[in-house]
Amino acid sequence: MELPQPEEFEPVQAVGGGAAALAATLRELADVRFALDQSSIVAITDARGDITYVNDKFCEISGYSREELLGCNHRLINSGHHPPAFFQNLWQTIAHGRVWKGEIRNRAKDGSLYWVDTTIVPFLDESGKPYQYVSIRNDISERKRVEEALRRMNDELEMRVAERTAELSRTNDQLQRELSERRRAETALERLSRQNELILDAAGEGILGLDLDGRVVFCNPAAARLSGHTVADLRGEPLATLLDANRSHPIYASLSDGGAHQGVEEHFRRHDGSHFPVEYVSTAIREGGRIVGAVLTFRDIAERRAIERMKDEFISVVSHELRTPLTSIRGALGLLASGQLPPDSDKCHRMIEIAVSNTDRLVRLINDILDIERIESGQVVMAREICDAAELMRQAVELMRPLAERAGVNLVVEAVAIPLWADPDRTLQTLANLLSNAIKFSTAGTVVHLAAERRADVVLFQVSDQGRGIPSDRLESIFERFQQIDASDSRRKGGTGLGLAICKSIVSQHGGSIWAESAIGRGSTFYFTLPLIQPGKDRGELDGELHRPLVLLVEDDPDLAQVTLATLGRLDLACQHARSGREAIQLCQHSAPDLLVLDLLLPDGDGFAVVEHLRQHPDLYQIPLVVYTVKDLDTFEKERLRLGPTLFFTKGRVLPEEFERQVVSLLGAHRPSLEETHVGPAHPGDR
Amino acid sequence: MSAPHILVIDDEDDIRAVVQVSLEDIAGWRVSVAASGGEGLALAARERPDAILLDVMMPEMDGPTTFAQLQADPATRTIPVVLLTAKVQPGDRRRFEDLGVAGTIPKPFDPLILARRVQEVLGWP
């Protein structure tokens, strides 16, 4: 097809006017096309898209010659960049006679791609159908390149931002983790530090931290208490405040040699200037291998020393007491065995008599030592039962009458029938012992008097003599072992020096007390108390009915209650459980238990209130009581808590076996059935 | 040397009797006895025995006190004293040695050789 010349160019719209006007219009059009060709890439196709005209710029950008292009379909420069729908839209637009605008990527002859901003104008025939299309394009490859570059840069930037954000997020997470880790560590450290502080505060031993100069950098309350200082006062003080010693003293050695050192023979000075014996251990504190100070722990061993001294003294006394009769026996027998004493001579008889009487004395002594050990260690349980004070008094007097007669002493007894809740054999032993003492220290013709009376909840026994009396400063110590006023005098009279100590143990085991009053030259009176029979108790006993003892446990802590009930259950005791003071009182009134095991800190009326209430009750004021508490009780408080025979146990300080033993002891009357239960198999099927 | 004269001070009747028979009948010595520290001091001053056998644990005046009084009296100061004691713990022994007595013989003792033990302690031939 011929390239349309400017003069042949068909106007899109009809133009009115004459030939001159037409010529002018054609010139104008030719100018427009020229201008267009200068600025744009122009092509014209027929209705099928076959190229009918291209300008130079088209040839230039497509790399094809005009000859190659003309007659070819426009698809020649299709780059394949755009999807088919793109061209469908394009064709649909222009085929309907509408102008299409868009950006197209085309392919040049050499295969390179270029972008053009395109406007396609359809030319319509009289019937309104397009018969050719004029495309006017502008090269936008550079813009696209820049745009692409920008896009890439943007993408890259975004990617980098994303990466950086992710990295930041990771770092942040890590930081958060580290932070919470640190918080956890700090909490743990704080807890540990608090625990350490509690341990330091609770420690019974004095604990001091020393710096390299031997100055106190920390100290616990025990260290302050033991030394009579305050914690604040001790801090910063040199160790010399507590100890008169220079730096060569071994207590400082840990600061220089880094080792641990201990001392057992040291004395620390208190704030008031007095001294106390201590045992100490000093240990170096190191940081990174370097010695930075020392920890010094110490304890006051004055009490331990005193106990050791008492023990040594006791061993020494026992040894002496055993060796004395043994000396007589060994001497007498040695002389008899030598054959150097004329047989049947007075000396010979005297030696035999010495050997016999001292052997008896030795036996008594050994029996008494073993007896008192067994009673005090709890191995002997008081076999309590209902017994009559009058009967026991009469038996004791009968037992002692021969001794009284030999001594020319008058024994007077005022036997009173009072029901006792006690071990009859041990009560008799106590009475006999006191009577025997009274007789031994009475002169002929004087009177030894035995009496008893009922006092509140006890029976009070008294044994009086008209002997030489006891110095007032010895009235308490005579109840200790081997503390007789006149050992040789006592021995001559068959005493072992343990009689009163045994009496004291027996009475204590019954929950009673023993004491003496005396006037020098006028005589002494020994008193002791034993619990009265509990009202209500005698009914079943006298009927011969053997019932399971009932124990009421008063405990608000459910766990402790369970443990204690289990313990009591093992003893085959019937148990009731009250969780408050009020409940305890109600249950006591309802079922009059044989034993009350009482906690003190209770809801709705504490243990003191319970005891106070039961004391007012004629049937309940003598119930045997075990006070089982965490509280350290003073004498006054203990007095307020006494009911019947009363024992005090501190929670956590009494062994279950001991608890069981004491419960059994308090319920002594039921002992036979209890012991059967105790030694029998745990389950009937075990046998 | 004629038969030594020994004063025995002990509150235990039976032990005094055994010591007396042991020293008199077995060793052939002469023996005086006192049942207390006070009695012993008086007897020592009056009889000036060759030696004194002194018990430690006695009521009222114990052995060490009696010894101190014997030492305080010029009349008895030179009489050697041997403690005859059932106090035989190591601590007891040290205390007795510090007193300045001639020696200690522990109870129980063998009555047949008691005199020999006293001789040894006192360095008598």
Image (cartoon, coloured by chain):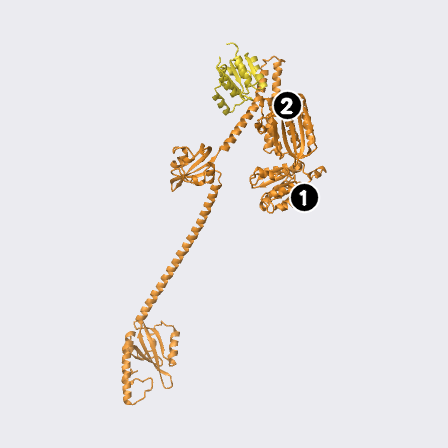
Chain colours: A orange, B yellow
Residue A475 location, x and y as percent? 59, 28
Local packing at callout 2 (Cα closer than 10 Å; few below 14, some 14-19, many 20+) is many
Disc 1 to disc 2, C-alpha distance: 51 Å
Ranked by sequence position, the earlier of labels 1 and 2 is 2
The reply to whether residue B113 is visible in this rendering is no
Kind of residue at badge 1: Ser
Q: The residue marked by circle 1 belongs to what chain?
A: A
The residue identified by callout 2 is A442
Q: Position of residue A648 (x, y in %)?
A: 59, 38
Residue A455, placed above or below residue A31: above
Q: Is residue A320 above or below residue A86?
A: above
Same chain check for tags 1 and 2: yes
- With A170 as the anchor, is A319 left or right in this view? right
For disc 1, the neighbor class at 10 Å (few under 14, some 14 to 19, many from 20) is: few
Q: Position of residue A15 (x, y in %)?
A: 32, 87
Residue at the image position 42 percent from the left and 53 percent from the top? A179
Based on the displayed image, in which of its 4 quarters is residue A372 positioned? Answer: top right
Q: Secondary structure at mark 2?
A: loop
In the picture as drawn, the residue positioned furthest to the right comes out as A543
Give the labeled residue for mark 1: A591
